[in-house]
Image (tube, rainbow, N blue to C red):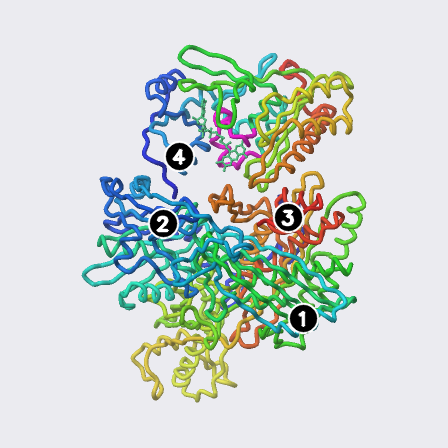
């Protein structure tokens, strides 16, 4: 447990002032927090509309079965029920299936067959939530059980039951194949290497488990023909377009509003059948309809994450020069391929599995399969599968260190990409924009006191105590992405931004990304403040309403600051350019004679003559003359298409103690040094890092969406699916270096997922290091006491 | 939001009133104390009841820790938090505070009761192990009067107890014996989780040797006997690491864990051993440190 006493004494962290009222970048308290702290947030479930009805979904109790019959008559007869709808009813309207974000299809309601436990089978619309739920009990479904496909390793066996019988001619459970890198070159390097290490590494299925579950209120207004959907969406614009394509409603008559969101982590990127059901219900019943899933529904049916069974192989010289990495992955995509990933990247950005190292060759082959489990796959702060990639490389590098009997820090140091090699093109084709890796590594080691820790470990080992030190070094690829090669369902991944400065110099910024707790209302105001010198409190940030914001693809994969943030900076500069022309008229000098001093233009060489941005705003809206050709008002709009992703990185050190008697792991210390380029609000960055580190400890030590042999999900509550509490995490020790991104307008990189990506390998490396006396080189997550004990008995077992 | 099926509820104003209501409403009625076991089951629709009889107003009548000359009486409505913070229990039976500190979380502990815990009879429930360790007896009242049963008689199996339909558990009685102390240890995957395995131990010393000792385990199959083989092995012996090891070995053999989400059967068996040793060791240390109360009479002086 973290107590005040256990906090390390670090002046710079303990005494920072988080409320420095910056006009621009710097520490400031979050503008959105007062409403959350006072319980005045406005979430989907807070929406109350006149005459609103409630929808509840009947879900399959089994993983794989044919539906023989559905009898809804008793439910229809419930006095408070307004409608009961089955897959057959939807099929009549052509709405039984919908596209997924990966160009697969997914059943909105099952018609003839259920393919995972928790799949949507029917829905009820009733006057209140209780009655809707009660009526579900009155629906009688007859199932004819089919053998389920649960083990991903045997999903492609010739005798495996075929899951996707809905797909024309489908004879197996194959979802897709994907490869990257150069197989022949990699094989050649492996053949000549002194040392080759291979390890089977599983990244189990986990769940984002946001505090707020998914839901929506659909309100179809018959007279205007307009559909308004309040929904838990991380990508309101993308959702609107998909609804237009699915339902045939014209896009301008669909308004998607994401109000406050209680955490997303990727869970709220996909379109779930429940949303479509609510829309259909509102169309049919002509009343607003609310659907909010309960905790079990969220855990068993919505977008999971990971579920990669990987074999990692690494080739190196005896003295620790890493030459190549090769990997073979079986990816479990569940019953429908619901992964959200840019279309050209079916495995997300897993291609960065070469990590932060300078290699001669790399190759990955992946096979994705269907199983009788919930669909999804994007989710949980993974930066499009970078979590899996970083875990693989950071684990396999530690395995190599084990075999070479080399310190894992030293091994990494010898192989890190050097500063002068940037921009660095990896062997799988990614162009890392900037990095000074060794500086970040050194900083983390210094905070941690690495050498002292190793000495302490040695002493403890001699006394039979189990202390472990784990290091990870990660590079992420975030900010999807350049339109030329990244799109979701054909929608390019650029983002719009509109800025309007009011006559009195206050401003409103409209962005296409979607805040879910990241602090956008503050960070984005600060970005504009830095460019225009308007205090952040004077800038309102609007997001989450397709009628009020420019088009863009939303917030996930740490893309907000890299893409929308760039758009915000550039739109502010565009406004400033116009302000300069107006200022030149006001000061009666040429534009070239003006210089910008944050918040005002002044005459070069005559600083007494200046006008503030507020003066200029009033002039822009006033009655006086404006310079030739200048329109009134002070506003601008742009769409930003990133030229590359940004590549944040970091060095993490984790210290654990393992109880030799009970095998319980205690994370004693965790040092995280992050480099996300320019730091806009360091307090918010630290908050993002703290959250991500906590996530990482959860995945490493306790989280797993597990199934039994029948395909029952045995993680359907938060007493079964464990997420960490304050008692499981130490006082986080954070540090940073700053290596700006060369192509981002303010040099910023994404940071929302860095810690979630970087921390699991650090924790696992630490636990495995603690178990070294038992001859253990690898043990899979989640490292629960029981699984750690198994490893201590010399039989570490995979979790699936 | 998970919502239960429709039900009616009433508040009992006395133990007799509660018994009367149970009797009148029949099998579809159930008592609700803290509600932290029953309400989640109703919300998940694992329990569908027509009537709830709320006995929280009986906290005045049934919420107490009373120290007598040779026993401590705990009212069934005593809340986890009251057990955790009771100075009487801390002095006499430190095992309570050890266990309560790791039962659920403060929100649950503010409402959940010892009576509800024992009556729920969840196989991983901690207070049954505590009561077993301390050789407690349970007082059950019905229309026909009161009876007292041992823990072994009380606990009939998972989710099953000796409390019949129109009956109510009113009190738990714990004998106080001189020169004793106790301890509890639990392994959980995360704070607030149910036990992977827990063990409680109580030791009474006579000079340098152990006069008596008992061990109670949770989450490793039914055992409400206090594991007599351990008591036999320890009686008359001087405490030593070898002795704890022997006791641990007996505990591991005496239990019958199963493999589940929380851990493998082998691991749980190992924990039964490890935690038995730890709690015995700690109990003896406490006696030696004079930390624990000797007997109720000593305290009352
Ligand atoms: C998140 C969470 C974590 C938990 N973790 C733990 C843990 O780690 N260890 C642990 O031991 N417990 C744990 N619990 C259970 C907790 O201790 C409950 O409070 C306890 O099991 C039940 O007590 P209650 O008063 O809430 O009973 P209720 O839920 O009100 O009742 C439970 C049952 O007992 C019956 N009942 C209640 N009182 C009486 C009585 N006087 N006479 C006859 N029948 C009665 C009821 O009819 C019902 O059937 C946890 C609970 C939660 C919600």
Front label number (2 vs 3) = 3
**Chain letter belonging to callout 1:** A
Q: Are marks 1 and 3 in contact (CB under 8 Å)?
A: no
Label 1 sits on a secondary structure element that is helix
Q: Residue tagged by mark 2? A: A292
Label 4 sits on a secondary structure element that is helix
Q: CA distance from mark 4 to mark 3?
A: 37 Å
Question: Magenta stretch?
Answer: B102-126
Q: Nearer the viewer, residue A721 or A672?
A: A721
**Quarter of the image holding residue B281?**
top right
The answer to whether tags 2 and 1 share a subunit is: yes
Q: Residue tagged by mark 3? A: A797
Is A731 within the magenta? no
In the image, residue B28 lies at what x, y percent?
35, 25
Q: Residue tagged by mark 1? A: A187
Q: Residue tagged by mark 4? A: B42
In the image, residue A173 lies at what x, y percent?
48, 58
């Amino acid at each position: 447990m973290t107590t005040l006493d256990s906090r390390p004494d670090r002046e710079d962290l303990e005494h920072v002032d988080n409320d420095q009222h910056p006009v621009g970048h710097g520490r400031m308290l979050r503008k959105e927090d007062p409403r959350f702290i006072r319980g005045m947030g406005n979430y989907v479930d807070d929406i109350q509309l006149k005459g609103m009805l409630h929808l509840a979904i009947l879900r399959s109790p089994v993983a794989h079965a044919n539906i023989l019959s559905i009898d809804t008559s008793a439910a229809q007869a419930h006095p408070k029920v307004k409608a009961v709808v089955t897959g057959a009813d939807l099929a009549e309207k052509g709405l039984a299936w919908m596209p997924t974000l990966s160009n697969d299809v997914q059943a909105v309601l099952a018609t003839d067959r259920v393919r995972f436990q928790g799949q949507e089978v029917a829905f009820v619309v009733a006057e209140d939530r209780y009655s809707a739920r009660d009526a579900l009990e009155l629906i009688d479904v007859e199932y004819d059980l089919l053998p389920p496909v649960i083990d991903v390793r045997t999903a492609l066996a010739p005798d495996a039951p075929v899951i996707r019988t809905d797909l024309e001619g489908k004879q197996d459970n194959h979802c897709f194949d994907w490869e990257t890198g150069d197989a022949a070159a990699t094989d050649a390097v492996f053949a000549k290497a002194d040392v080759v290490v291979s390890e089977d590494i599983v990244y189990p299925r986990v769940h984002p488990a946001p505090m707020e579950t998914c839901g929506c209120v659909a309100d179809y207004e018959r007279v205007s023909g307009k559909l308004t959907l309040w929904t838990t969406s991380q990508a309101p614009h993308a959702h609107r377009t998909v609804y237009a394509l699915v339902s045939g409603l014209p896009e301008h008559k669909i308004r998607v509003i994401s109000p406050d969101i209680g955490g997303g982590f990727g869970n709220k990127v996909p379109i779930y059948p429940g949303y479509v059901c609510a829309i259909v219900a509102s169309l049919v019943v002509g009343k607003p309809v609310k659907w909010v899933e309960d905790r079990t529904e969220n855990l068993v049916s919505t977008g999971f994450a990971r579920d990669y069974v990987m074999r990692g192989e690494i080739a190196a010289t005896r003295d620790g020069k890493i030459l190549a990495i090769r990997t073979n992955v079986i990816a479990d995509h569940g019953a429908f391929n619901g992964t959200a990933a840019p279309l050209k990247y079916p495995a997300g950005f897993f291609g960065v599995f070469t990590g932060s190292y300078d290699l001669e060759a790399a190759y990955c082959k992946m096979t994705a399969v269907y199983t009788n489990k919930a669909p999804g796959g994007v989710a949980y702060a993974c930066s499009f599968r970078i979590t899996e990639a970083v875990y693989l490389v950071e684990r396999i590098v530690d395995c190599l260190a084990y075999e070479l009997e080399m310190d894992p820090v030293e091994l990494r140091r010898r192989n890190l990409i050097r500063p002068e090699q940037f921009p660095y093109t990896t062997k799988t084709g990614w162009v890392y924009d900037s990095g000074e890796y060794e500086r970040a590594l050194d900083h983390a080691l210094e905070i941690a006191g690495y050498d002292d820790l190793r000495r302490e470990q040695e002493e403890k080992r001699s006394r039979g105590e189990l202390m472990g030190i784990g290091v990870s070094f990660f590079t992420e690829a975030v900010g999807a992405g350049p339109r030329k090669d990244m799109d979701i369902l054909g929608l390019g991944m650029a983002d719009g931004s509109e800025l309007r400065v009011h006559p009195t110099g206050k401003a409103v910024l409209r962005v296409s990304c979607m805040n879910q707790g990241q602090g956008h209302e503050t960070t984005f105001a600060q970005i504009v403040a830095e460019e225009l010198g308007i205090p952040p409190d004077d800038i309102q940030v609007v997001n989450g309403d397709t009628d009020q914001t420019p088009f863009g693809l939303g917030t996930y994969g740490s893309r907000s600051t890299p893409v929308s943030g760039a758009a915000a900076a550039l739109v502010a500069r565009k406004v400033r350019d116009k302000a300069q022309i107006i200022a030149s008229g006001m000061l009666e000098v040429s534009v070239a004679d003006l210089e910008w001093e944050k918040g005002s233009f002044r005459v070069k060489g005559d600083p007494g003559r200046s006008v503030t941005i507020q003066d200029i705003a009033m002039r822009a809206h006033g009655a006086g003359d404006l310079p030739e050709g200048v329109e009134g008002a002070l506003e601008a709009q742009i769409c930003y298409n990133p030229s590359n992703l940004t590549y944040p990185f970091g060095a993490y050190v984790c210290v654990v103690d393992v109880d030799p008697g009970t095998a319980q792991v205690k994370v004693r210390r965790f040092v995280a040094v992050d480099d996300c380029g320019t730091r806009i609000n360091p307090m918010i960055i630290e908050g993002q890092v703290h959250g991500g580190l906590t996530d990482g400890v959860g995945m490493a030590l306790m989280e797993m969406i597990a199934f039994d042999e029948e395909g029952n999900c045995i993680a359907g509550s938060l007493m079964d699916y464990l997420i960490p509490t304050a008692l499981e995490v130490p006082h986080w020790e954070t540090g940073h270096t700053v290596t700006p991104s060369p192509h981002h307008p303010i040099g910023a990189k994404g940071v929302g997922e860095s810690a979630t990506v970087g921390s699991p390998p650090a924790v696992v490396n630490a636990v495995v290091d603690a178990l070294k006396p038992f001859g253990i080189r690898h043990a899979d997550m989640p490292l629960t006491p029981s699984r750690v004990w198994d490893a201590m008995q010399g039989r570490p077992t995979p979790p699936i | 939001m998970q919502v239960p099926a429709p039900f009616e509820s009433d508040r009992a104003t006395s133990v007799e009133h509660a018994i009367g209501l149970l009797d009148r409403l029949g099998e579809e009625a159930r008592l609700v104390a803290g509600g932290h076991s029953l309400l989640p089951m109703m919300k998940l629709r694992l329990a569908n009841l027509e009537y709830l009889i709320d006995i929280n107003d009986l906290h005045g009548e049934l919420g107490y820790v009373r120290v007598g000359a040779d026993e401590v009486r705990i009212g069934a409505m005593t809340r986890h938090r009251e057990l955790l913070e009771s100075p009487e229990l801390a002095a006499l039976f430190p095992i309570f505070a050890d266990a309560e500190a790791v039962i659920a979380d403060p929100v649950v502990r503010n409402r959940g009761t010892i009576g509800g815990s024992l009556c729920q009879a969840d196989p991983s429930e901690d207070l049954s192990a505590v009561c077993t360790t301390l050789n407690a007896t349970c007082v059950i009242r019905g229309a026909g009067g009161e009876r007292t049963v041992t823990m072994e008689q009380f606990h009939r199996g998972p989710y099953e107890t000796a409390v019949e339909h129109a009956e109510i558990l009113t009190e738990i009685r714990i004998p106080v014996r001189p020169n004793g102390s106790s301890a509890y240890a639990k392994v959980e995957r995360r704070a607030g989780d149910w036990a992977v395995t827990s063990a409680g131990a109580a030791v009474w010393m006579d000079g340098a040797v152990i006069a008596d000792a008992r061990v109670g385990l949770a989450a490793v199959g039914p055992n409400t006997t206090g594991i007599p083989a351990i008591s036999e092995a320890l009686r008359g012996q001087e405490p030593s690491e070898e002795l704890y090891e022997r006791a641990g070995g007996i505990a591991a053999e005496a239990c019958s864990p199963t493999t589940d989400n929380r851990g493998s059967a082998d691991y749980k068996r190992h924990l039964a051993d490890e935690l038995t040793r730890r709690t015995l060791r700690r109990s003896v240390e406490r006696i030696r440190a004079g930390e624990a109360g000797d007997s109720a009479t000593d305290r009352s002086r």
